[in-house]
Amino acid sequence: MTINKELLDILACPVCKESVELKEEKLGCVKCGRRYPIKDGIPVMLVDEAEVS
């Protein structure tokens, strides 16, 4: 799965507002570690959908 670099540059974790990076088919926050799913190529940046590590 690939996400456009420009999209990755503007996305931020809705909890701590830090940047996210692609990790194991999900978007992972670089600060708090929450992982947001990507469904049908669309990042789901909802706190209720996040996995907490």
Image (cartoon, helix red, strand yellow):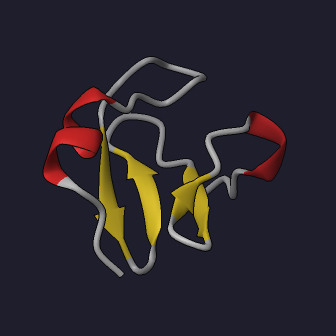
Point 47% across, 48% down: residue: 33
Along the line of sight, the residue nearer the viewer: 3 or 52: 3
The C terminus lies in which quarter of the figure? Answer: bottom right
Tally of numbered discs: 0
Q: Is residue 43 above or below residue 3?
A: above
Which quadrant holds residue 47?
top right
Q: Is residue 20 left or right of residue 17?
A: left
**In the image as oriented, which residue stretches furthest toward the right?**
48
Along the line of sight, the residue nearer the viewer: 46 or 18: 46
Q: Is residue 2 left or right of residue 41?
A: left
Q: Position of residue 16 (x, y in %)?
A: 50, 19
Point 43% across, 18% down: residue: 17
Q: Position of residue 29 (x, y in %)?
A: 41, 43
Which quadrant holds residue 25?
bottom left
Point 47% across, 37% down: residue: 32
Q: Is residue 45 above or below residue 38?
A: above
The N terminus lies in which quarter of the figure? Answer: bottom left
Q: Position of residue 27 (x, y in %)?
A: 44, 57
Q: Position of residue 14 (x, y in %)?
A: 57, 24
Q: Is residue 50 left or right of residue 2?
A: right
Which quadrant holds residue 31?
top left
